[in-house]
């Protein structure tokens, strides 16, 4: 089985080396056991620091690492570019994970094992379903704010019901990426929701898998500042995929 892992990177010079070292060492061992053939695609999006130089140093040590650069910032743009790049080769499963090591390689590989053991088309990590753990524990008010506003809005607009939509570790079979990649419209906010909604529209079955998540102190996501942008993006996403929309480009 051939696995492609996409890591979007925006100004990640201070932590991308650690992430790549952990992931490349973990999957190098699996490759030696003939369990998987793995590539790691780091997609730099609008970086203004030395992320490229750090990744290039990692490439000297680990041949499985590939690097792409796009000019515009945006997680959605970066992952979509990674999807397109991965599809130029015969990868069987294609996924993405955040650059901050909130998801360890072992936890990401639980998604690989889940797809091997089931008939699902994709597997997503979940921080909130029974059996999951988050370190350090999040304040309850933050979690309940998400449940009351954000998650209810998704259920209302998209008729989806997952424990966790935004966890930055998701994996899909090749056929899923081939189907949904041309339909993506979101450049940044709500990208994960769009991926799951397109899976639903195309009839793919997605499995949610409990994970162990380590919150990173220097995460770029600021809840108060990003909340309104996320809600706005959900509305735009609903419009983009309505029958009246003529959107055929990435917009948010």
Image (spheres, rainbow, N blue to C red):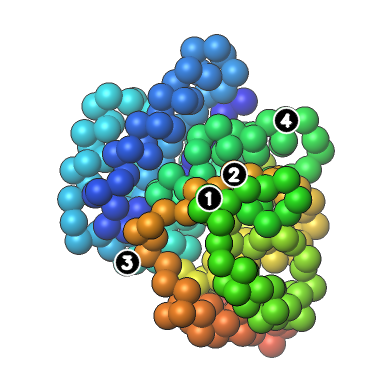
Which label sits in the foreground, 3 or 1?
A: 1
Q: What's the distance in space between the residues labelled 4 and 2, CA to CA?
A: 20 Å
Secondary structure at numbered mark 1: strand
Residue bearing mark 2: 212
* Of the image marks 2 and 3, the number of the one nearer the N terminus: 3
Asked if labels 1 and 3 touch by Cβ distance under 8 angstroms, the answer is no
Residue at image position (38%, 39%) is 19
Residue bearing mark 4: 116
Which label is found at residue 135? 1
Q: What's the distance in space between the residues labelled 3 and 1, CA to CA?
A: 32 Å
Residue bearing mark 3: 72
Percent across and percent down for residue 15 are 30, 46
Asked if labels 2 and 4 touch by Cβ distance under 8 angstroms, the answer is no
* Residue 97 visible in the shown view: no
Secondary structure at numbered mark 3: loop
Q: What's the distance in space between the residues labelled 2 and 3, CA to CA?
A: 31 Å
Looking at the image, residue 189 lies above or below residue 235: above
Residue at image position (74%, 61%) is 162
Which label sits in the foreground, 4 or 1?
A: 1
Which label sits in the foreground, 4 or 2?
A: 2
Q: What's the distance in space between the residues labelled 4 and 1, CA to CA?
A: 28 Å
Which label sits in the foreground, 2 or 3?
A: 2
């Amino acid at each position: 089985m051939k696995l492609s892992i996409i890591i979007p990177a925006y100004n990640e010079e201070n932590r991308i080396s650690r992430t790549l070292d952990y992931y490349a060492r973990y999957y190098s061992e699996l490759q030696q056991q003939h369990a998987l053939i793995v590539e790691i695609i780091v997609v730099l999006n609008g970086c203004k620091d030395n992320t490229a130089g750090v990744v290039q140093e990692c490439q000297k040590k680990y041949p499985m690492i590939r690097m792409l650069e796009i000019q515009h910032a945006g997680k959605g743009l970066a992952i979509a570019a990674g999807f397109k790049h991965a599809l130029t080769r015969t990868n069987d499963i294609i996924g993405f994970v955040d650059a901050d090591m909130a998801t360890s390689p072992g936890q990401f590989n639980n998604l690989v094992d889940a797809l091997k053991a089931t008939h699902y088309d994709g597997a997503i990590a979940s921080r909130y379903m029974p059996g999951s753990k988050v370190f350090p524990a999040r304040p309850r008010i933050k979690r309940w704010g998400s449940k009351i506003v954000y998650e209810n809005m998704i259920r209302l607009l998209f008729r989806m019901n997952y424990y966790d939509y935004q966890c930055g570790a998701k994996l899909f079979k090749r056929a899923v990426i081939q189907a949904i990649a041309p339909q993506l419209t979101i450049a940044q906010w709500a990208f994960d929701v769009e991926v799951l909604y397109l899976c639903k529209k195309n009839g793919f079955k997605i499995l949610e898998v409990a994970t162990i998540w380590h919150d990173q102190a220097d995460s770029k996501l600021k809840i108060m500042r990003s909340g309104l942008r996320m809600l706005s993006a959900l509305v735009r996403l609903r419009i983009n995929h309505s029958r009246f929309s003529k959107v055929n480009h990435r917009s948010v």
